[in-house]
Image: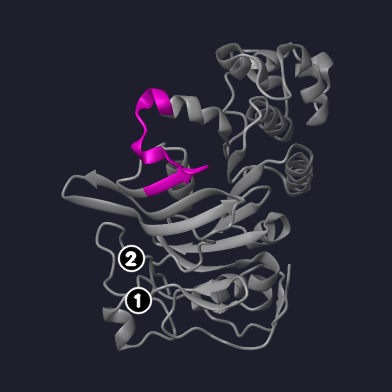
């Protein structure tokens, strides 16, 4: 069940790069307010890939974008290397943004169709100057690193496939030598065979250049393959947080288990838990646990009291009044 809390944050860890605490993102619309993100907390350590997973509309993309203040959170804090980005003015925030880059879902529409590939990748250096390991005379080297032949640097994006355009997007994100890259469903628009290539490339770039990734997806198979730690979200709330292997071995949240049961072709000893009913409105979310209207284990307390995130042992945390505690179960995807 979906709740709030900060028990899962790694206090005192000197390697924590990003710390998000009690972040709220709301959008006013005619007649009400969309509660997109409601009290979400998480952190990212250097060199880690945090996977954020959940069905469409759960707030995962809004959560990740709010980290880079696009949009700015309604409340809460987002600390990058100890500095709260929510308190920075526009100019100070602009100075931080090169360290926080983003790769978008649609690789073709995210690239300027009027510019050449070389110009697209080098644009950040034109604005900021040489940064870190990259400079204008090393663009060809960066293109080779992501698998694009430098001879094609004068071509336009429409002359490349979707997978090649995503490689270009990765190069554009890397050129400013960032510390964190937000990957907003970067493979969902690609063929399955190309997805594997892009995932392998992201893993390679992470290891080679020491960046941390926030990887957003609704596909648990993808999340399992690329993530070190996984956060499951439902209607703007955190459901479960654990290491990737632990989460797939011991899913304790009823929503997580339902997602795993729905993986096509999976071989799981998780009892099938179907999520019934429609997703509630984000304008008028249900009281208590937001998952109570669709949860097979919901009781009266779930309808009145919001669960707090609790530790289950190791690096496994869940926000549920009735978590499923059992021995390891294997989910093969």
Q: Residue furthest left?
A: 31
**2 or 1: tag closer to the N-terminus:** 2
Q: Residue at x 55, y 14 (%)?
A: 127
| Residue 236 quadrant | bottom left
| Residue 210 quadrant | top right
Color scheme of the displayed model? one colour
Judged left or right of residue 120, residue 299 is: left
In percent of width and height, residue 278 lies at: 38, 68
In percent of width and height, residue 179 lies at: 62, 37
For label 1, count other residues whose C-alpha is less than 10 Å away and answer few (under 14), some (14-19) or many (20+). some
Tell me, yes or no, whether the highlighted magenta stretch contains residue 85. yes
Q: Residue at x 37, y 76 (%)?
A: 307
Give the quarter of the figure containing the C terminus: bottom right
Tell me, yes or no, whether the highlighted magenta stretch contains residue 110. no
Q: Nearer the viewer, residue 32 or 304?
A: 304
For label 2, count other residues whose C-alpha is less than 10 Å away and answer few (under 14), some (14-19) or many (20+). some
In percent of width and height, residue 254 lies at: 50, 78
- Mark on residue 106? none
Total marks shown come to 2
Q: Residue at x 36, y 40 (%)?
A: 86
Q: Vertically, is 312 above or below 327?
A: above
Q: Vertically, is 83 above or below 264?
A: above
Judged left or right of residue 173, residue 256 is: left
Provide the secondary structure element on which disc 2 rests: loop
Is mark 2 in CB contact (under 8 Å) with mark 1? yes
The residue under label 2 is: 280
Q: Which residues are magenta?
A: 77-92
- Mark on residue 293? 1
| Residue 183 quadrant | top right
Q: Nearer the viewer, residue 23 or 297?
A: 23
């Amino acid at each position: 069940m979906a709740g709030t809390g900060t028990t899962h944050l790694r206090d005192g860890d000197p390697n924590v790069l990003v710390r998000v605490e009690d972040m709220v993102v709301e959008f006013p619309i005619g007649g009400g307010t969309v509660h997109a993100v409601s009290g979400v907390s998480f952190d990212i350590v250097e060199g880690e890939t945090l996977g954020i997973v959940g069905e469409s509309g759960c707030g995962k993309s809004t959560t990740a974008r709010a980290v880079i203040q696009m949009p700015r959170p309604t409340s809460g804090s987002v600390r990058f290397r100890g500095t709260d980005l929510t308190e920075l003015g526009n100019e100070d925030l602009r100075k931080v943004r090169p360290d926080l880059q983003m790769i978008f879902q649609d690789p073709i529409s995210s690239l300027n169709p009027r510019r050449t590939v070389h110009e697209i990748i080098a644009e950040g250096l034109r604005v900021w100057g040489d940064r870190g390991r990259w400079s204008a005379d090393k663009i060809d080297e960066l293109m080779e690193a992501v698998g694009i032949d430098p001879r094609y640097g004068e071509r336009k994006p429409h002359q490349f496939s979707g997978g090649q355009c995503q490689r270009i997007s990765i190069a554009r994100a890397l050129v400013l030598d960032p510390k964190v890259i937000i990957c907003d469903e970067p493979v969902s628009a690609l063929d399955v065979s190309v997805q594997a290539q892009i995932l392998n490339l992201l893993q390679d770039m992470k290891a080679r250049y020491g960046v941390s990734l926030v990887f957003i997806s609704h596909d648990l198979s993808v999340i399992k393959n690329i993530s070190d730690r996984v956060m499951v979200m439902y209607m703007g709330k955190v459901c479960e947080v654990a290491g990737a292997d632990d989460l797939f071995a011991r899913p304790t949240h009823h929503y997580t288990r339902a997602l795993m049961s729905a993986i096509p072709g999976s071989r799981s000893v998780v009892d099938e838990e179907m999520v019934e009913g429609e997703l509630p409105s984000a304008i008028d979310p249900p009281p208590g646990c937001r998952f109570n209207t669709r949860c097979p284990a919901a009781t009266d307390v779930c309808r009145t009291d919001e669960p707090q995130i609790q530790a289950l042992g190791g690096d496994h945390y869940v926000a549920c009044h009735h978590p499923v505690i059992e021995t390891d179960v294997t989910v093969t995807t």
